[in-house]
Image: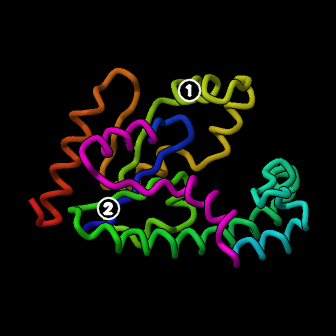
C-alpha cells in the first residue's frame, strides 16, 4: 500500500480535494483533527501540555482550553515550537499505526497543512500539493474565518511560499475554481492505484 500525503497553503482548498478522494473510497487521515483528539486523549501528551501551560491547559471536563493555549503560544515562538515538538511525534506515531491498518487499500492519504515544514513527508511515498492563486486563497480565508483582508493576507503570507511547496510535489492539483477537480483527482487516483500494483 502506498502512503500518500496531501498538503497546500491555507485557503488552497485541500479539504475539498480530500472529499473528492474520499468519494472514490480512499481512506484519509486528517492530521489537524487527529492532533486535537490526541491532545485530549493521549496521556503522555496531556502531561507534556500541562507542564508547558499549567493546570489551566484543560477545562474541568478534560477538554483542551484552546483559548488559554493559543493566547500563550502565539505570543511566544519558543513555547509554540515546544508545543509542536510535543504534538508532532504523537501524531507521527498515530499516523504510522493508521497507515498500517489501511493495508486493504491501494493507497491511503494523510492530509496536513505542515507536511513539508515538519518533514513528515519524508515517510511518505508520494506527495500531492493543492494550489490556488493568492487572491483566491485570501478571499477563501476571509469567507471561511469571517476575518479581515489584512489578517487573512498575513496568515497566507506567513506560510511557506506556494512555489516552494510545489517543488516538493509529485502531483499538483489546481483548485482555482475554474478547473474541474474531479478529472484532476481521477488522473492522480488512476496513477497511484497503478503504482501500488493493486488495480
Taking the magenta stretch, the answer to whether it contains residue 18 is yes
At horizontal 11% and vertical 66% (from top left) the residue drawn is: 197
Q: Is residue 27 above or below residue 150?
A: below
Give the image quarter of residue 121.
Answer: bottom left
x and y percentages locating residue 84 in the rendered image: 69, 66
Q: Which mark is residue 140?
A: 1
x and y percentages locating residue 70 in the rendered image: 81, 51
**Magenta residues?**
15-44
For the stretch drawn in magenta, what is the main secondary structure?
A: helix
Q: Is residue 20 above or below residue 116?
A: above
Residue found farthest to the front: 61
Q: Relative to residue 4, is residue 162 drawn left or right?
A: right
Residue found farthest to the left: 199
Q: Relative to residue 81, is residue 23 drawn left or right?
A: left
Nearest to N terminus: mark 1 or mark 2: 2
Q: Which residue is mark 2?
A: 126
SS at mark 2?
strand
At horizontal 74% and vertical 23% (from top left) the residue drawn is: 148
Q: Residues within 10 Å of mark 2 (few under 14, many from 20)?
A: some
**Total tally of numbered discs in the picture:** 2
Residue in front for this viewpoint, 152 or 17: 17
Q: Which mark is residue 119?
A: none
State the separation of the CA atoms marked 1 and 2: 27 Å
x and y percentages locating residue 183 in the rendered image: 21, 34
Q: Is residue 50 above or below residue 141?
A: below
Scheme by which the image is coloured = rainbow
SS at mark 1?
helix
At horizontal 41% and vertical 52% (from top left) the residue drawn is: 6
x and y percentages locating residue 112 in the rendered image: 50, 54
Amino acid at each position: 500500500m502506498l502512503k500518500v500525503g496531501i498538503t497546500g497553503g491555507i485557503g488552497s482548498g485541500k479539504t475539498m480535494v480530500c472529499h473528492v478522494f474520499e468519494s472514490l473510497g480512499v481512506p484519509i487521515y486528517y492530521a489537524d483533527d487527529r492532533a486535537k483528539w490526541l491532545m485530549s486523549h493521549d496521556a503522555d501528551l496531556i502531561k507534556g501540555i500541562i507542564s508547558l501551560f499549567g493546570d489551566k491547559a484543560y477545562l474541568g471536563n478534560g477538554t483542551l482550553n484552546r483559548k488559554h493555549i493559543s493566547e500563550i503560544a502565539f505570543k511566544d515562538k519558543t513555547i509554540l515550537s515546544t508545543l509542536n515538538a510535543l504534538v508532532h511525534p504523537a501524531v507521527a506515531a498515530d499516523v504510522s499505526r493508521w497507515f498500517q491498518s489501511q493495508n486493504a487499500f491501494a493507497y491511503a492519504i494523510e492530509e496536513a497543512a505542515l507536511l513539508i515544514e515538519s518533514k513528515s513527508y519524508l515517510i511518505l511515498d508520494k506527495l500531492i500539493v493543492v494550489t490556488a492563486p493568492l487572491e483566491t486563497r485570501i478571499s477563501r480565508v476571509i469567507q471561511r474565518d469571517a476575518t479581515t483582508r489584512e489578517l487573512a493576507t498575513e496568515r497566507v503570507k506567513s506560510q511557506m511560499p506556494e512555489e516552494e511547496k510545489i517543488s516538493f510535489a509529485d502531483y499538483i492539483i489546481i483548485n482555482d475554481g475554474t478547473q474541474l477537480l474531479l478529472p484532476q483527482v481521477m488522473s492522480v487516483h488512476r496513477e497511484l492505484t497503478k503504482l501500488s500494483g493493486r488495480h
